[in-house]
């Protein structure tokens, strides 16, 4: 009972954080142009798969959903980075609601995807950045196989690809100074297990590239 | 909170009545001829409601809020511009400094520092932003980067800030008289009216394109019809809203009609150069912020300087610039 009420309290804090800080900040400083928001999943378990260029990516993705779905949204993030000290760990788990995973692949004893599967089993909408890292700003890196493994293990699970543009210009890796830019979000159609891991990844990559092609992206080099 | 003079309130009330009529007309039209055109018209009118509400509220609450409103407008327009144009990765921090010009420019307005207001962007930003770029030292694409940066600041910050400077003008003969809100309302109302009138006259009787290469939808009849409409309305409401007489109001209206037309074409040419149709999606039915303030980037400075030379103002010549 106590656990339940503290969990509800945590959910309220998280909702207040997004309602009062994150959303007004994104609306004023960034400004989002969202295409096809109707394609986003409306219930869990589901996967949302996005390209990754900036720490802002996760705030933007979490803000795309109605506030009441916020408790269900769980972004996957690297434990070694986001739990590296008490304050960051509190912020990451309480306010952002991350599922921490170990980077660098599994061992014979530990399956790195186990925490993600546990969240999915509870009906979460899991947000995943299959590039694994923010990498070069505004460049789509190679996708890692974790998402394909998840789709293989849960053939009924759908992964919705989302392409983000501009956030890597606003706040790229290695920069602490935020420079305002309007940003684009393009949501694609959901993908399911297609029978082959490599083909699944190639399909998702193709889809993200196709979503990027919907936009007029000015030169930035 | 002191309310603006009665003519300002009456004009705002008249605009509300017009919006109600437009809303009903759009709804009737959507009933009779459903389709994408009617839906777009309804969307446009709905966005007009939002824009008018924000503008009217900014004007009614008082001087600081009105100035902040124009600062926000400049910020959104500059952000849209920087998001549309090709920029260099190395200039990310330079763009940050360019954004910082906005609070300063509007601070000069609020301080009534006329000389600095005029010199800050065309002189100091023009000279100093390249210094930041030189510190980075990338020369490939340097001229294009420095040029587009300054163009954006001039268009979205310097030009638009003239609307805010109108707000703080005080007649030298009677400094206690509040004329700013009336002048700003006159400028914005005539600019938007001219946009709408040009569009409607063009749709109704327009045939010959006036600038086929830049904006094929603009017609000679549209331009002249807008000019006539704006001049008639302007000479009627100008004397009510501002210290200008009927003849001066007619002159100001002509200037706004011509300036608004050029400002519109100016942004059209930029969009054509960049290969885009709308500057953004911030204002549903209208496009982006730049699509809406394109005319104002020309009419605001032109109208301001006309008004500035027609009367003697307390800040004239920069003699009184500090008034905390």
Image (cartoon, coloured by chain):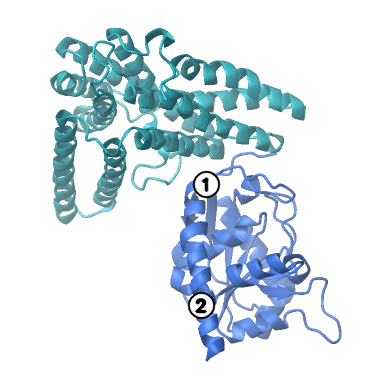
Q: Nearer the viewer, residue A98 or B141?
A: A98
**Quarter of the figure that contains the C terminus of chain A:** top right
- Give the numbered dot on residue A9: 2
Q: Quadrant of residue B9?
A: top left
Instruction: Return the residue at label 1.
Output: A29
Q: Residue lying at the far bottom in this picture: please name it.
A: A1
Q: Quadrant of residue A117?
A: bottom right
- Shown colour of chain B: cyan
Q: Nearer the viewer, mark 1 or mark 2?
A: 2
Residue A76 to residue A140: above or below? below
Q: Chain of mark 2?
A: A
Residue B223 to residue A145: above or below? above
Q: Residue lying at the far right in this picture: please name it.
A: A108
Q: Residue at image x 45%, y 33%?
A: B74
Q: Residue at image x 14%, y 52%?
A: B28
Residue B103, given in percent of the width and then of the height, sits at 50, 32
Asked if the residue at tag 2 contacts the one at tag 1, i.e. Cβ–Cβ closer than 8 Å, the answer is no
Q: Does dot 1 land on a helix, a strand or a loop?
A: helix
Q: Chain of mark 1?
A: A
Q: Does dot 2 land on a helix, a strand or a loop?
A: helix
Q: Quadrant of residue B163?
A: top left
Residue A58, given in percent of the width and then of the height, sits at 60, 62
Residue B324 to residue A122: above or below? above
- Give the numbered dot on residue B221: none
Can residue B24 be seen at all in this image of the molecule? Answer: yes
From the viewer's perspective, is B260 left or right of B234?
right
Q: Nearer the viewer, residue B288 or A16?
A: A16
- Shown colour of chain A: blue
């Amino acid at each position: 009972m106590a656990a339940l009420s503290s969990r509800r309290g945590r959910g309220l804090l998280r909702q207040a954080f997004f309602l009062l800080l994150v959303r007004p900040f994104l609306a004023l400083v960034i400004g989002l142009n969202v295409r096809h928001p109707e394609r986003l999943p409306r219930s869990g378990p589901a996967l949302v798969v996005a390209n990754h260029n900036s720490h802002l990516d996760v705030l933007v993705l979490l803000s795309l959903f109605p506030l009441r779905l916020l408790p269900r949204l769980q972004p996957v993030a690297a434990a070694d980075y986001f739990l590296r000290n008490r304050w960051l760990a509190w912020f990451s788990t309480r306010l952002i609601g991350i599922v921490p995973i170990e980077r660098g692949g599994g061992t014979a004893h530990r399956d790195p995807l186990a925490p993600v599967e546990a969240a999915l089993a509870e009906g979460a909408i899991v947000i995943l950045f299959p590039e694994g890292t923010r990498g070069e700003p505004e460049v789509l890196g190679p996708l890692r196989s974790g998402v394909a493994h998840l789709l293989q293990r849960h053939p009924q699970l759908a992964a919705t690809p989302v392409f983000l543009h501009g956030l890597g210009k606003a706040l790229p890796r290695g920069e602490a100074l935020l420079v305002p830019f309007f940003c684009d979000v393009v949501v694609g159609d959901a993908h399911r297990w297609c029978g082959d891991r490599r083909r699944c990844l190639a399909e998702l990559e193709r889809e993200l590239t196709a979503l990027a092609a919907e936009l007029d992206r000015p030169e930035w080099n | 909170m002191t309310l603006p003079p009665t003519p300002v309130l009456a004009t705002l009330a008249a605009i509300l009545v017009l919006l109600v009529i437009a809303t009903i007309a759009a709804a009737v039209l959507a009933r009779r001829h459903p389709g994408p055109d009617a839906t777009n018209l309804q969307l446009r009118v709905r966005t007009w409601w939002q824009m008018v509400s924000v503008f009217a509220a900014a004007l009614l609450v008082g001087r600081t809020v009105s100035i902040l409103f124009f600062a926000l407008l400049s910020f959104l327009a500059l952000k849209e511009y920087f998001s549309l144009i090709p920029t260099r990765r190395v200039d990310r921090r330079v763009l940050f400094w360019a954004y910082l010009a906005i609070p300063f420019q509007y601070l000069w307005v609020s301080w009534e520092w006329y000389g600095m207001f005029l010199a800050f962007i065309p002189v100091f930003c023009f000279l100093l932003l390249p210094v930041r770029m030189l510190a980075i030292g990338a020369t490939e694409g340097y001229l294009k980067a420095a040029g587009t940066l300054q163009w954006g600041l001039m268009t979205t910050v310097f030009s638009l800030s003239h609307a805010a400077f109108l707000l703080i003008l005080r007649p030298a003969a009677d400094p206690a008289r509040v004329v700013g809100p009336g002048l700003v309302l006159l400028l914005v109302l005539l600019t938007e009216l001219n946009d709408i009138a040009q569009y409607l006259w063009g749709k109704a009787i327009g045939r010959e394109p006036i600038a086929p290469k830049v904006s094929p939808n603009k017609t000679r009849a549209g331009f002249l019809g807008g000019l006539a409409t704006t001049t008639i309305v302007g000479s009627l409401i100008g004397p009510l809203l501002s210290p200008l007489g009927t003849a001066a109001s007619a002159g100001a209206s002509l200037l706004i009609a011509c300036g608004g037309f050029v400002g519109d074409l100016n942004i059209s040419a930029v969009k054509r150069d960049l290969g885009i149709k709308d500057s953004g999606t911030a204002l549903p039915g209208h496009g982006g912020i730049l699509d809406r303030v394109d005319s104002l980037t020309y009419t605001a400075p032109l109208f301001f300087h006309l008004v500035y030379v027609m009367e003697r103002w307390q800040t004239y010549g920069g003699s009184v610039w500090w008034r905390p």
